[in-house]
Amino acid sequence: MRRVQNRVFAVASISLGLLAAVPVHAASVVMVNRATWGASGVPDYVNMHIYVPDQLAENPPIVVACHSCSTPVSGFFNSISGIREGADRNGFIIILPEAAGRNCWDVGTTRSLTHDGGGDTQAIAQMVKYTLAEYSGDPKRVYAMGGSSGAMMTQALLAVYPDIFRAGAARAGVPAGCWADGFDQSNQWSGNCAAGRTSKTAQAWGDQVRAMYPGYTGRRPRLQIFHGTADATINYNNYGEAIKEWTNVLGLSETPTSTDNTTTANGTTYDRQFWKHECGYTVFEAWSGRNGAHSMPYEHDAILAFFGLDRAGATDPEIDCSGPDGSGGMGGSGGGAGGDQNVGSAGPAAGSGGIAGEGGSPGGGATGGSAPSGTAGGADPGAGPDSSSESGGCACVVGNAKPKSSYAAAVALGLALLTFRRRK
C-alpha cells in the first residue's frame, strides 16, 4: 500500500512541477469594436486590434505598430515577434491599427496630414486615447513604429500628433508630407515620392510639418529611421530627405553629433548617425543599411532600447530640456550638442534576427510615376505579405492558460504533497 501511495504522490508532484515550469500565454490579438474605441468622424475602413500581455505593467506604456501595404494584421504581428516578446516581458500594450480593404495607409491627403482632420491619423490617435483610458496607460509613454507604409504612418503620426507620441521608429519610410506629392487616391500610392523625386530644403520640410498642427509649441517626438541603400520600392533618397526634415523639426544641425557603423545580429551592416539635443540626449538616429533591400529585418532590440522598453519598470529615457512639456523643435537648424552618441539606445540588436519583415521581392516602384506595374490587386510591390514570415494567424497561444501566479501555487502544492507523504 505504501508503495502505491509513494507512486501516486510522485506522479502528482511531477505533474504539478511540469505545470509550473511550462508557461502558457493566454494573451492574443483582439479586435476592438469600432463603437468601443470611439470611431466617430474617421474613415470606416480603419479597424483597431490590440495585444494586452498577461502581466500588464502599472500605467503601461503603449506601442502603436502599423502594418505595411496589403499586409494582414496577423502576418505583421508575426514579423514583429521581438516587440511582442518585449511586451510579454515588460508589460506594455501593442495597438495594431488596420486599413481594411485598402492598399496602403492614407498619409497623402490633407485630412490625414492635419491634426484632428478626420483621416487615418486621427483614427489611430483615437485608438490611443481609448487605450490610455481603458488600461490606465501612461500618456507620456506612447510610441509608434512600422515598416514601409507603416513607417510612413509612423512619421505622419509624429508630425500630426506630437502631443500624443513620445518617439517613433520607421523602417523604409518617407518624410512626413512627402506622400502628398502625386498621391493617388485609388491605391494610396505616390509615384513621385516613392521614386525619390520629391526633394525640399530642410526649412521647407520643417514648415510643412509645423503646418500640420498650427500653433503647437510643445516638445517634438524623437525619431529613429532605418533605410536600405538598395531599396527598390521606396527610393533611398527618402532617407536623406527625412534627415533634412527631422533635424529641422527638432531644431538640430544637419551635421550629426556622432557617427559609427555596426553589424547587427540580423546580419545587416549599418552606417549610423546620431543627433543629441542641448541636454545631451540622442533624439534622432538614422541607420543606413549597406545594400539593404526594402524589407530588412526589424532591429527589435534597438527599437525597444530607443523607446526605453527594453526593461521592466523603466521610465522614458529622454531628458526634456525646457520643463515638463519641452519647447524645442520649432524650426531653424541650430547647432547640435557635442559628444558621443547615447550608447544605451544605439547598441546592436542582438537576438532579434530570423524575421524577414513584410516585404516580398522588390517591384518597380522606384522608377514609375504612378503605382508600378506587376502589382496584384493594387498592392504595394515589395511590401506585400511574405509567405515565410507573415502568413498564418497570431504568433501566440490561445487557450485557458493559468496566470503566472498559479505556477507558484502549483509548486507549493506539490511540496506540500511530498511533505505529507514523508509524514505518513
Image (cartoon, grey):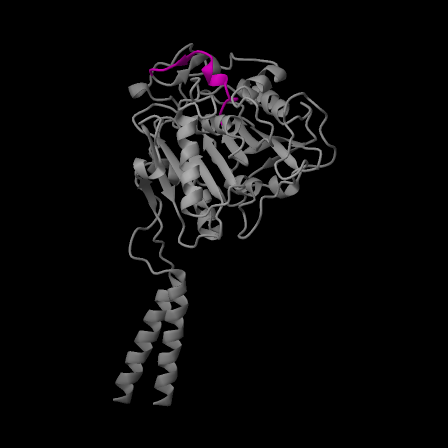
Q: Is residue 185 magenta?
A: yes
The location of residue 275, given as percent across then percent down, is 66, 31
Q: Going 52% across and 13% down the picture, which residue do you hit? A: 198
Front in this rendered view, residue 141 or 145: 141
In which quadrant of the rendered view does residue 356 lie?
Answer: top left
Name, please, the residue furthest toward the right: 338
Q: How many marks?
A: 0
The location of residue 2, given as percent across then percent down, is 28, 88
Give the answer, above or below, for where 396 lies relative to 43: below
Position of 337 with respect to 171 (left or right) is right
- The magenta span reads 172-186
Q: Going 32% across and 51% down the picture, which residue do you hit? A: 397
Name, please, the residue furthest toward the front: 215
| Residue 81 visible within the image | no
| Residue 220 visible within the image | yes
Q: Going 35% across and 45% down the picture, which residue do you hit? A: 395
The location of residue 406, given as percent across then percent down, is 37, 65
